[in-house]
Image (cartoon, rainbow, N blue to C red):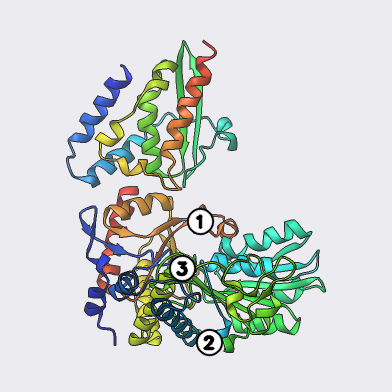
Amino acid sequence: MLDIKKIRGDFPILNRSVNGKPLIYFDNGATTQKPKQVIDAIVKYYSEQNANIHRGVHTLSREATILFEEARKTVAEFINSGEEEIVFTAGTTDGINIVASGLDLPRGSEIIVTEMEHHSNILPWQLWCERNEGKLKYIPVNADGTLQTEKLKGLITDKTKVLALTHVSNTLGVINPVKELIKSAKECNLIVLIDGAQSVPHMKVNVKDLGADFFVFSGHKIYAPTGLGVLWMDKKWISGLKLGKAGGGTIKTVGFDKTEYAEGPLRFEPGTPHIEGVLGLAEAIKYINRIGIETISKYEHTLLDHATKKLNEIREVEIYANSLNKAGVISFNVKGAHPFDVGTLLDKYGIAVRTGHHCTQPLMNCFKIPGTVRASFAFYNTIEEVDAFVEALKKSIKMLS
Amino acid sequence: MTIKEIEQEIIDEFEIFGDDWEGKYEHLIDLGKSLPLIETKYKTDDRLIKGCQSKVWMHSELKDGKVIYTADSDAIITKGMVALMVRVLSEQKPQDIMNADLDFINKIGLKEHLSPTRANGLVSMIKQMKLDAQAHNLKI
């Protein structure tokens, strides 16, 4: 069971007010708030532990390196991976770019994404295609928010090399049947990347069980600092993926005639990493583990169910992907009102939601809408907050009618 | 009326609401209803203001040495903001429009619409209206 009062007490920012009203933060899909344990870990690092890692022989450097690599272990265990398969990146977007530029695909290859992808899981592939005479295809989305998974096989030709898809849609909250799609893709020898930015914070993820080649997620969406992410790659890719960037910290020996790169994930981590970000991520994962990701998942479901029920009662509200099993996100529109209007008024009531295309313009075009209002929950939100949001929404609808 | 006089009129109107933001926004939404609407034939993509989360179309013409603006938006609050800008700047001389400092927006408590977020259309709109005035100025 969640001790919601204690949890909220751990997140200092939840005490603030916005426009004279208590902050109701429903924009967790954009970024999450941080518990003081994570904030304290960062402060402690800079107050007592800061040193460059992997590089020194002195005590501070050794201690910092140990902390850093222990953090790698914590992250690995969280998604059921080996430590040697965890690469720290600057975020999900960075991770996808590393993969897209690192796969040695033949010129003219085809890459399949989906119509609901975040731009970060479209643009790196699109760039590759533009530069290599490749072709970008996509699995379309149904009006109810489900993927037309039956179309996948028909999209695959002998030129198709990659399937990149999102585990959970940041706009719709829809949980895609990734295991099934990975299986189909593997039958055709495709390389698979899963965007887990919106799944990892809300459900148990077991990368070994999923069976993809790459899995990416961001620290700042899982209660950890910004500027940091994780790229999980199946062992074989550690030597198989080309390096897109290189620099200090990735090598065994360097010479102008020949350089020997390190084995293992360090190959992909040139330069000094976002050390406090990594430590913050480990702390955030420990915080989640103390509550339990399953407990969090169940609680967030009750919030989502309650919000869905209440919003369905409002005549003017249309919820997208209404009937589906979703994770933490509810996107809707008010008939006759632009999402921007709704979001602006909700903000005056202290409620932070996101409006617009949510970096999923192809999805918006598919639904023929300019954008949606998106409320995305985390385990520090409450039923009372959902009720307050519904009341504020009703008032906003009245003002806009 | 001069630009400054219209701005003062608007400031006085909004002052009545004091801290009642609901009242202010209701008034803003109401003002939007009186926006001189852009003709359908001018509602083309090249008249869309870039940088808005919602769509804003703006058209201007020179008449007797004064700039006449017509516009529309698909978002109600935005339409209200557009109506305010048109009320202040329309039927004024190009030079006066180019030199207007428009600080009334701050004074009526709607300055969050001036924040430099990606979706801020108000700044783009003001810029476009001034550019239009500059273009018309060259014809005089």
Q: Please tell me how crowded label 3 is: few (under 14), some (14-19), or many (20+) other residues with Cα within 10 Å.
A: some
Given this view, does label 3 or label 1 mark the residue nearer the observer?
3
At x 59%, y 34%, the residue is: B46
| Residue A172, percent from left and from top | 49, 67
Tag 1 secondary structure: loop
Of the pair A124 and A154, the residue shown nearer to us: A124
Q: Are marks 2 and 1 on the same chain?
A: yes
Question: Mark 2 and mark 3 in contact (Cβ < 8 Å)?
Answer: no
Residue type pointed to by label 2: Asn
Mark 3 chain: A
Question: What residue occupies the far right of the structure in this picture?
Answer: A158
Mark 1 chain: A
Q: Is residue A382 visible?
A: no
Please name the residue that numbered disc 2 is placed on: A206
Residue A121, placed above or below residue A55: above
Tag 2 secondary structure: loop
Please name the residue that numbered disc 1 is placed on: A357
| Residue B79, percent from left and from top | 40, 38
Disc 3 to disc 1, how far (Cα)? 30 Å
Please name the residue that numbered disc 3 is placed on: A274
Residue type pointed to by label 1: His
Disc 2 to disc 1, how far (Cα)? 30 Å
Q: Please tell me how crowded label 1 is: few (under 14), some (14-19), or many (20+) other residues with Cα within 10 Å.
A: many
Given this view, does label 3 or label 2 mark the residue nearer the observer?
3
